[in-house]
């Protein structure tokens, strides 16, 4: 008996009905295999129990299961591979249909369906997060760069600039552009100035030369960054780079002709002793002594009242009228007065002047009397302070700057040891004596300040060194009057009427980083100077304003040129400069109308001398303040619609101040007149300061004021002076281009309507042209005492000041063969002593 077979037989209907589904199932398997489902999903399909094992209706033992036929050409939706599975299907490890917003599996299971972010979205989100972090870090670094030291701030700036995009924000808002010279345009345009190397502040905290190497270097000594000698060294290096046609600053070691002692125009290398013995107690004849004494009281004492005029004049008369012999220190003071006046007599070619070296003889007597070894090791008294102060003054007048710096330190130390730097509240000391001591201290203070500016060295008069009241605007013979006595006895009233009205009181309370300093204006903190302006003009009032300006200018040195500035961010330095600029402007607005040196007014020699003294010091302070901003890499060139940077404005103020200081000098050189009405003991310093600044701007390519009419005038002056020197020294200037000058163009020029930053007065004011002085009566050979000087402000040509044609002047000098205006040493290659003729060296300057 045949066993029934479960396999389908051929020709059986049932078997024929089941073959198609079997074939369809195979086709389905082939489709699923081709789609390559995940292994987990495949195993899940393989583990599906057969239909016979499913619960429900009981099937016959050998019953055949009918498999429904699937429609051909229809592929289940879940068979396709989706790019992204939902989180629920991923967790169940099932194939996701990829339907949105809910897949089929999650819909059937009624669970939450959530699709994760795609790889592209995740990458974009991560990049956005990193960009946000980078911007936050950059902002943090910029904020840190404003409070850390200069080197760290520069490192931060360089790093931020290195990784910033082409159109991104630059990290340093105060970066400087390069010079406009052709060499710099080639490959130096992108180099930026660091926070610690802007302008004259480069390497302010170190010495780059061996000062102790040679006698000349020791005679010169160290010169700081605010000295015009250092500026001249920078100018020399700039011109060397232009000659070599190389971009950037000169990077070689400052040796040889580039050493600082090679740029020094002072005479510290000359000896100040006289050969042979000196009669210590010899006194000049009474007529000569009277002239020397009166010359000192007229030209020096008003600006340096280190002695009591009334008291010393009485002692002087007693000394000559009687046989009494004073002490050695008093005789030393008298001989120093003679020495200073004798030096001035030679400069002005006074007919009563003595021998060429008589001032050295007077100095030697004073040294023997009160500056010998015993006196230096003795405890100081008030007369010793006066001796040391007068010795320092003579040395400056003789251009012995290094020696003067050394001696004035003794005077300041001696004054401090006597407590002159503090307010005197002693009941046993008369008020007049206190006032005299106050003036002695301010003489030592101002002179130390002046020498600090000239040498660029750290001064001993730092912040908080003194509480000495400023001098009263009364002459010595007026101190016994009721108005002066009231101020001498009432310190609160003195504080209210005098000190609180001056600009120096604000400087003493200036913070290290004044907030909004760059936007500070003199109108922000106006002072009530009505009482001072109501006082009659006197020499003591001029001295008061000079002391006030000296305190502000000394703060410039302490805040801008101190050694700690190398560790201070440049933005902080700019805030300090802006705040100090407003203080200088306050000083100018406090001036009485009679002392306003910008006004056109006729006055006598004494008033002219006082106004010129204030004017020189005012412009010098502005030049010193803005010099760090005057550098070859000025603010980057922007569109004309954008305002210039703060550094650019300060550079313009510096250049305009230099130009206006030169306007104080007559166009026609007259040394006798210059030494008679100007501060003759330091006028050469002022001239070198202003000319060096203008020449530096020329070496930079006039990048700060390229289209200014005043720049053209400055170039004409420098070019004409250079051609005068060339004629006298037989220099070849054939390769120097000759410009077509129009010597009368400035007569018809329209008034300057430039911005306020170009003015020499407070930025918010419109200033008239700066003054010049000239001689309307006689020529250069006429004695100055017989001449009435006029103080004029116009820039146009006057009858007293003929317009100078540089070409015709050059030809005239060539015909005369004189080089008296510019004494030049062809061996050392530098100017000697002065730009102006030295007495007894040119016959044309002698009195008729």
Image (tube, rainbow, N blue to C red):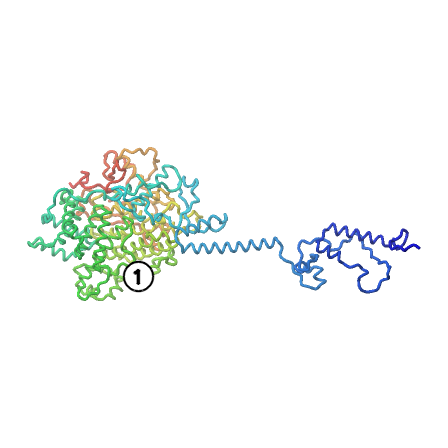
Quarter of the N terminus within the rendering: bottom right
Q: Quadrant of residue 711?
A: top left
Residue at the spot of label 1? 527
In the drawing, does residue 843 fall left or right of residue 830? left
Residue 692 in percent (x, y) is at 31, 44
Q: Secondary structure at mark 1?
A: loop
Residue 331 in percent (x, y) is at 13, 52
Quarter of the C terminus within the rendering: top left
Q: Nearer the viewer, residue 525 or 815?
A: 525
Q: Nearer the viewer, residue 607 or 171?
A: 171
Residue 173 in percent (x, y) is at 43, 51
Residue at image coords 43%, 50%: 155
Q: Residue furthest right?
A: 1
Residue 780 in percent (x, y) is at 20, 42
The answer to whether one can see residue 160 in this image is yes
Q: Nearer the viewer, residue 35 or 686?
A: 35
| Badge 1 density bin: few <14, some 14–19, many ≥20, Cα 10 Å | some
Question: Where is 199 relative to 90, above or below?
Answer: above
Question: Where is 488 relative to 188, above or below?
Answer: below
Question: Where is 82 relative to 692, above or below?
Answer: below
Residue at image coords 48%, 55%: 137
In the drawing, does residue 836 fall left or right of residue 643? left
């Amino acid at each position: 008996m045949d066993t029934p077979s479960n396999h389908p037989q051929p020709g059986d209907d049932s078997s024929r009905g089941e073959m198609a589904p079997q074939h369809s199932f195979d086709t389905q398997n082939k489709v699923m295999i081709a789609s390559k489902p995940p292994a987990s999903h495949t195993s899940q399909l393989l583990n599906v129990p057969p239909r016979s094992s499913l619960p429900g209706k009981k099937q016959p033992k050998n019953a055949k299961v009918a498999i429904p036929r699937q429609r051909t050409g229809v592929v289940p939706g879940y068979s396709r591979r989706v790019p992204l599975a939902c989180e629920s299907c991923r967790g169940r490890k099932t194939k996701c249909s990829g339907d949105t917003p809910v897949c089929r599996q999650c819909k059937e299971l009624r669970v939450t369906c959530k699709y994760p972010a795609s790889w592209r979205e995740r990458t974009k989100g991560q990049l956005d997060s990193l960009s946000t972090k980078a911007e936050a870090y950059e902002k943090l670094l910029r904020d840190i760069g404003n409070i850390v030291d200069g080197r760290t701030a520069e490192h931060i700036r360089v790093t931020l600039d290195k990784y910033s995009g082409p159109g991104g924000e630059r990290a340093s808002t105060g970066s400087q552009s390069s010079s406009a010279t052709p060499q710099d345009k080639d490959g130096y345009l992108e180099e930026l100035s660091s926070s610690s190397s802007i302008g004259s502040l480069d390497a302010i905290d170190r010495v780059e030369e061996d000062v102790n190497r040679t006698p000349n270097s020791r005679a010169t000594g160290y010169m700081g960054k605010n000295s015009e000698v250092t500026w001249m060294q920078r100018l020399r290096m700039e011109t060397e780079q232009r000659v070599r046609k190389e971009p950037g600053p000169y990077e070689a070691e400052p040796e040889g002709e580039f050493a600082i002692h090679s740029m020094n125009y002072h005479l510290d290398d000359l000896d100040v002793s006289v050969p042979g013995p000196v009669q210590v107690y010899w006194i000049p004849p009474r007529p000569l002594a009277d002239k020397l004494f009166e010359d000192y009281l007229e030209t020096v004492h008003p600006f340096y009242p280190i002695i009591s005029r009334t008291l010393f004049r009485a002692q002087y008369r007693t000394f000559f009228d009687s046989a009494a012999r004073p002490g050695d220190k008093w005789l030393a003071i008298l001989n120093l007065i003679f020495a200073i006046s004798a030096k001035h007599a030679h400069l002005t070619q006074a007919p009563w002047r003595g021998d060429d070296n008589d001032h050295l003889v007077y100095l030697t007597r004073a040294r023997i009397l009160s500056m010998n070894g015993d006196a230096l090791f003795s405890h100081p008294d008030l007369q010793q302070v006066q001796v040391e102060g007068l010795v320092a003054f003579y040395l400056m007048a003789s251009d012995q700057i290094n020696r003067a710096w050394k001696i004035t330190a003794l005077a300041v130390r001696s004054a401090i040891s006597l407590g002159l730097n503090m307010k005197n509240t002693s009941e046993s000391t008369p008020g007049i004596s206190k006032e005299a001591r106050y003036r002695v201290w301010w003489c030592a203070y101002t002179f130390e300040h002046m020498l600090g500016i000239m040498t660029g060295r750290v001064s001993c008069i730092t912040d908080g060194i003194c509480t000495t009241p400023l001098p009263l605007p009364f002459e010595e013979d007026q101190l016994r009057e009721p108005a002066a006595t009231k101020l001498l006895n009432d310190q609160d009233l003195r504080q209210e009427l005098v000190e609180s009205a001056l600009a120096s009181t604000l400087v003493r309370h200036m913070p290290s980083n004044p907030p909004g300093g760059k936007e500070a204006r003199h109108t922000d903190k106006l002072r009530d100077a009505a009482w001072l302006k109501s006082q009659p003009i006197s020499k003591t009032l001029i001295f008061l304003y000079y002391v006030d300006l000296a305190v502000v200018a000394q703060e410039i040195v302490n805040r801008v040129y101190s050694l700690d500035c190398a560790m201070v961010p440049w933005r902080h330095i700019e805030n300090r400069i802006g705040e100090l600029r407003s203080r200088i402007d306050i000083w100018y607005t406090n001036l009485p109308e009679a002392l306003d040196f910008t006004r056109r007014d006729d006055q006598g020699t004494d008033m002219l001398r006082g106004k010129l003294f204030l004017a020189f010091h005012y412009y010098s302070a502005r030049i010193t303040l803005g010099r760090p901003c005057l550098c070859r890499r000025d603010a980057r060139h922007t569109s004309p619609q954008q305002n210039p940077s703060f550094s650019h404005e300060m550079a313009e103020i510096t250049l305009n101040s230099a130009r206006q200081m030169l306007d104080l000098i007559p166009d026609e050189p007259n040394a006798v007149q210059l030494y008679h009405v100007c501060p003759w003991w330091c006028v050469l310093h002022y001239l070198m300061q202003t000319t060096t600044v203008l020449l530096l701007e020329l070496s930079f390519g006039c990048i700060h004021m390229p289209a200014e009419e005043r720049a053209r005038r400055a170039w004409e002056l420098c070019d004409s002076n250079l051609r005068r020197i060339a004629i006298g020294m037989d220099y070849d200037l054939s390769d120097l281009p000759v410009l077509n000058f129009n010597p009368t163009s400035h007569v018809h020029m329209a008034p300057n309507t430039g911005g306020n930053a170009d003015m020499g007065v407070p930025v918010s004011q419109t200033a008239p042209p700066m003054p010049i002085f000239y001689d309307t009566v006689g020529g250069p050979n006429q004695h100055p005492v017989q001449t009435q000087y006029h103080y004029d402000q116009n820039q146009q040509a006057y009858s007293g000041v003929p317009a100078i044609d540089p070409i015709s002047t050059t030809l005239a000098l060539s015909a005369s063969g004189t080089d008296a205006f510019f004494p030049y040493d062809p061996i050392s290659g530098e100017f000697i002593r002065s730009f102006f003729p030295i007495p007894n060296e040119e016959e044309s300057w002698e009195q008729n």
